[in-house]
Each structure stands twice: as C-alpha cells, then as structure tokens.
Image (cartoon, grey):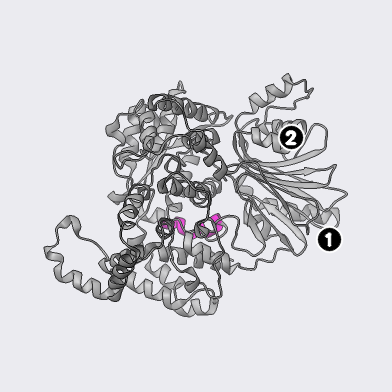
C-alpha cells in the first residue's frame, strides 16, 4: 500500500522548484508509505509525480516508484494491490511479449499490461484495489484511475491553473496554488450523510474520482474526459437479467469457491499478514477461509470495551478459539478511546463523522504492532443483506403503502400537532403501565419520526430518511444548497425489489464514501494495509445474480453467506443480534467529552465562524444534555466539522 501525488500546470517554474514542491507534497503522505519515496519531474513539461512506498510485494528496489515501463513511454505511481498479476504476467509471456522483468512487483506487471493491451483493456482485467496516476510521455497525457468499488482514494482538482491530484487531500493543500475555499454545498451533503460523498470534497473545485473511472487530461485547464470501465448499477442490472441458474446448494458451493479464491489471492505478501476479527458473520467467514488455507495459525485481532453493549471481544475470542487462530485482543479503556479523537481531523483530511472511526483506528493500531497487512470483512452487509434496515423497511412500507395517501397525511398532521415536549409529558404520565418491552426513550421524537414516515411520498424517500443524519441540512449550513446526489435524485435504474434497491444504493454510496474511507484512512494512518476479499468484483457480480430470498429469509439476512460460514464455525458461535462497531458517544458527550464539546459548540464561536446555524445546534445540545433526546449522531457531525475546521 502506498500514497502518491503530483501536478500538471503551465507556470514556468524551474526544474528545481518543481522538485521541491512535489517532494513537499509527497512527504505529507509518509504515513501511507514509510518504506521509501521517489519523485519524477518531466524536463519538458510542467508535470511532477511523487510516491511513498509501503513495501508489501517485492521488497527490493525493483519495486521502487514512480516506475517507468520497459519502453520508457509510461510512468506510473500506484496505490493498492492487483492480486492476479502472476496470471497476467504468464499471459503476457505466452502472448509472445519479450519483457526483461526487473523484479516481481505488481506495479511492473501493471505497466506491461497497459503497454501491451492499452489502459482500458488492462484495467478491466485487474483483480484488486487500486488508484494510480499514469503519465504518457509520448502523448503528454495524464490519466487517473480508481478501482471498481472505490476501495482506494484519489482526489483531483484545478487550483489557479494547476491540476493537482493525490491519495489524500493533505498532499494537495501544500501546493502553492491551492486555494482551500470551503464548499458550503458539499458541507450540506456532509450533514446529511456524515461524510462527503463522491465526487465532492470539502473544497471548491476539488473532487474525488468516482469508482470504476478513468480520468484523462492533456492540458490542466481543459475539462477532463471521464471513461467508465466498470459501472456498478449496470453490472447489478446485468446480473439480475442473467440470474444464477443452479440450485441453492449449487450457489452455496459456488460462493464458497469464489470466496476461497478471493481470500487466497489476498494472502500473497512478502510481509506478515493477519485479519481483523469481530466474531460477526463477515469477519468470521474471512478468517475461517484464511485459516483453511494456512498450515500455521493465522494472526487475528480484536478490541473490547468495558461497556457490554459495545463489546464484541468475547464473540471474537470464541470464534478464534474454534478456528485455532493466534488471537490478540486489546481491552480499550475510555481514556484510550478518547485520546484518539484529537487525531481524527488530520487522519481523515476532511470532515468525517462515522464514530466507528474510533474503534477502527484502535484495532488498526493494535494490528500494526504485529503485521503489515490485515484482511477485513467489509462489504458483506451490502452484498448479502446484512443491515437492519433491509429487514424492516420493505415490510413497513408495504403496510403503510396500503393506506390512502390522504389518510396517511392526516395521521401525520395529527402526530405533529403536538410538540415533542408535549408527547414526552403525556408518555411520562402513562409509562408505569406500559409493558417493559414497549417502553421507549424519546417518545416525542419517535412520534414525530412516525409522522415523517407517514407523510413520505414513496418508499425511496423512506430510505433517504433512514440514512440521513440532518434531514434538512440547508437549514443548518448558512448559504449552502444541497446538490443532487444518487440519494436525492431518486430516478435511478430499478431493481426487482425495494430491498435490493437499498442494497444497491449502499453498495455505490455508503460503502465507498463511508465504510471503505473509514478503513483506508484508519489503517493507512498507522501504515497498515487492509484488504477486503468480500468485495472482490467477481463476488459482487455473483452475489447480485442470486435471488433475494437466498440472502434474506424469515427476517434473517446473509442466509447464503451464513451457510458458507457454518461449514467452518458452529452456528451457535455467531448467531446474535447485529451490534455494529460502535462506541458510547451518547454517554461520553454528557460526561467525559462534555467540556471538549461545549468549547466547540460555543454559540459565539459558531457565530464568528459563520458556517452553521448556532440556534439549531444549541437546541440539540441542550436537549442531549438533559437526557430527553439522544442527538449523538447529529452532534457528532457538528463536532467533527468543528474539530476539523479548528485544525485548518
């Protein structure tokens, strides 16, 4: 795993100055590549490219980057791993290519494939995770490429005549032409999603390259040309049009074979390797398939919390014991978790408020003490129907949708006619006679939430409400307008069911923008490579060719993935309600983090900054402190923005 950065511009800088700037940009990415660095500056063009290396395969200088192709035409700086390069190398040799290989790095094979087959054909053959910059010295043309699912990051943008690009925003910020103007419209997206979705970034005129895309540019001021070599929506639709033709038992066998191979090729490494293990379905499946293919106990890692509702460590330990892994567990104290928080703005580079970033960073820190590569179970929820919303959203809408729209609107108006506080007061009067299983926190908020659902025009608006943090972010962000995104435009290719449509949405938005970003930044902050076999694109395509009932049955998700796992782990070890990878933010904000939060949420400070509506924020903060409502997610969004802004 590595990091790269560079620029293409027209200003007449000296060769020495270009070298100094690209070196400074590259040094910002030292955490992504502590094992080596390299720079390349075109003598005849204002182009510069820098690379930081985390050595995983071919630890010799033969893997050094930026790397020239054998002909000298192409130059590449690359972040990621392509796992099928041994097969591709063999194909090149069998095809009569006479290549004097310098080593066995995947970078060298990638260049040879591009030179032999062309970029688009070559990249469509790669199996792995990658982002790279390719400079064609003959055509004087830059091409940026990102992998199919968006596992690896890549930013770009035009700033005062300079086209800048890099693995993380921090490398762009040190270029002398970088302007750093906050994009208030993108900020509204942040408060809806708790992340800034692609293609936007927190800065104006700086973007994330969308997954499965090639960007081509010759002049820095020209509009880039975009080529899609893998389209998630199209792939999913095609898979459903050509469904798997075998039986359920055949599908279990096929999935087992695909996952075995996806794991196997991700075990290739010249450095120590292990896995994150939570004890849930996804990570347990990955670890089981790793251990099946290893003659030695693999190394697994988990963290635990004193708070029982957040502690998955005992489940992980039980799975590790059954599989015979060499398991390491860290019991995290509140202080250790809280000490991570000041580091988050610098690690994530732009506002990012998925609070599971805290345990993800902690488990990455633990894992890096022992290995350099770790396999992760991310992606199983989106592919095999794992999130709770997949279980209840469609049945709920099926019931509500039967009611006439006028009736639903009337019920919604009645529920909203009483303010939240009045609903709370009424509930308190009758709480003592309410059965324990029906008692609730924040009854007023729940009543208004039900009213919102009743008033929705269609099922896709229900999904939007479920995945939104701030429902009306333009009321919070001053002078911000929310851009249209995949979430808000609604008019997108259809799926055979509402549940599958939600899964597809999560696959192309929530997974790359939130989950994969969280894991990439947390792991790379400590120079750890995280590999994600469940979203090998071959597994993705196969999973979407299966009927929904093979994934969701009797309100239990991941049916087919569970049946693969049960070949290796007893059902009793992994059957439990989904917990998620969380931390007790709600309680911390009222106690351990209260002074820190109060400082960031100071009304005068918010007024001076001029980005957010202080009245809305202070209202939610006071309600949270009183215990009447849990606003942890909304407040964490604001706090992560404020903490990021103060570090600028």
Local secondary structure at mark 2: helix
Q: Residues within 10 Å of mark 2 (few under 14, many from 20)?
A: some
Whether 448 is drawn above or below 145: the answer is below
Q: Residue at x 67, y 26 (%)?
A: 88
Provide residue 643's location: percent of width, then percent of height.
Answer: 50, 65
Q: Quadrant of residue 431?
A: bottom left
Give the residue pinned by disc 2. Answer: 114
Q: Which residue is drawn at 42% across and 36% down?
A: 547
Whether 185 is drawn above or below 499: the answer is below
Q: Residue at x 78, y 56 (%)?
A: 220
Residue 77 horizontal side relative to residue 200, left or right:
right
Give the residue pinned by disc 1. Answer: 11
Q: Which label number is shown at residue 313?
A: none
Range shown magenta: 338-348
Q: How crowded is mark 1: few (under 14 residues within 10 Å), some or many (20 or more)?
A: few
Q: Which mark is first along the chain, 2 or 1?
A: 1
Q: Residue at x 21, y 74 (%)?
A: 425
């Amino acid at each position: 795993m590595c990091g790269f950065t560079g620029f293409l511009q027209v200003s007449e800088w000296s060769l020495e100055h270009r070298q100094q700037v690209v070196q400074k940009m590259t040094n910002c990415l030292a955490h992504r590549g502590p094992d080596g660095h390299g720079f390349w500056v075109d003598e005849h063009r204002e182009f510069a490219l820098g690379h930081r290396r985390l050595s995983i395969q071919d630890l010799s200088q033969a893997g050094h980057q930026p790397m020239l192709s054998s002909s000298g035409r192409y130059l590449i700086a690359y972040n990621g791993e392509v796992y099928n390069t041994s097969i591709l190398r063999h194909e090149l040799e069998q095809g009569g290519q006479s290549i004097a290989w310098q080593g066995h790095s995947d970078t060298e094979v990638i260049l040879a494939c591009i030179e032999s087959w062309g970029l688009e054909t070559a990249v469509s053959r790669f199996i792995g995770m990658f982002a790279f910059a390719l400079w064609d010295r003959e055509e004087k043309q830059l091409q940026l490429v990102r992998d199919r699912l968006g596992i690896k990051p890549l930013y770009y943008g035009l700033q005062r005549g300079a086209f800048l690009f890099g693995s993380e925003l921090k490398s762009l910020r040190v270029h002398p032409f970088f302007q750093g103007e906050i994009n208030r419209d993108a900020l509204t997206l942040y408060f809806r999603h708790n992340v800034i979705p692609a293609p936007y970034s927190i800065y104006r005129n700086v973007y994330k390259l969308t997954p499965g895309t090639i960007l081509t540019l010759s002049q820095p001021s020209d509009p880039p040309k975009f080529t899609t070599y893998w389209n998630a929506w199209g792939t999913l639709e095609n898979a459903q049009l050509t469904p798997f033709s075998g039986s359920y038992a055949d599908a279990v066998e096929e999935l087992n074979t695909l996952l075995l191979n996806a794991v196997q090729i991700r075990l290739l490494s010249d450095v120590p390797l292990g896995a994150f293990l939570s004890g849930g379905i996804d990570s347990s499946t990955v670890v089981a398939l790793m251990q099946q293919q290893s003659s030695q106990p693999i190394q697994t890692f988990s963290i635990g919390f004193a708070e029982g509702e957040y502690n998955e460590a005992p489940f992980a330990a039980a799975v590790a014991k059954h599989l015979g892994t060499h398991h390491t567990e860290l019991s995290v104290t509140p202080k250790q978790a809280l000490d991570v928080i000041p580091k988050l703005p610098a690690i994530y580079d732009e506002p990012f408020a998925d609070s599971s970033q805290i345990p993800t960073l902690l488990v990455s820190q633990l894992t890096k003490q022992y290995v350099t590569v770790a396999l992760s179970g991310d992606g199983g929820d989106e592919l095999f129907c794992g999130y709770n919303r997949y279980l209840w959203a469609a049945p709920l809408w099926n019931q509500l949708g039967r009611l006439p729209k006028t009736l639903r609107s009337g019920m919604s108006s009645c529920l909203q006619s009483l303010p939240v506080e009045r609903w709370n007061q009424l509930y308190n009067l009758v709480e003592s006679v309410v059965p324990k299983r029906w008692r609730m926190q924040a009854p007023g908020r729940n009543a208004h939430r039900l009213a919102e659902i009743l008033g929705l025009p269609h099922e896709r608006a229900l999904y939007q409400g479920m995945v939104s943090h701030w429902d009306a972010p333009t009321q919070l962000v001053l002078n911000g307008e929310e851009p249209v995104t995949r979430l808000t435009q609604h008019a997108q290719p259809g799926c055979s069911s509402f549940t599958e449509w939600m899964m597809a949405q999560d696959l192309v938005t929530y997974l790359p923008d939130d989950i994969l970003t969280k894991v990439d930044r947390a792991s790379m902050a400590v120079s750890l490579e995280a590999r994600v076999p469940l979203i090998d694109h071959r597994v993705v395509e196969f999973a979407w060719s299966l009927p929904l009932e093979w994934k969701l049955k009797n309100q239990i998700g991941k049916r087919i993935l569970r049946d693969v796992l049960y070949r290796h782990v007893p059902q009793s070890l992994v059957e439990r309600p989904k917990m998620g990878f969380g931390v007790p933010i709600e309680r911390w904000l009222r106690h351990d983090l209260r002074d820190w939060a109060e400082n960031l949420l100071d009304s005068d400070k918010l007024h001076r900054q001029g980005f957010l509506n202080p009245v809305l924020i202070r209202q939610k903060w006071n309600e949270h402190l009183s215990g009447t409502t849990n606003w942890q997610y909304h407040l964490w969004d604001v706090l992560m923005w404020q903490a990021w802004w103060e570090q600028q």
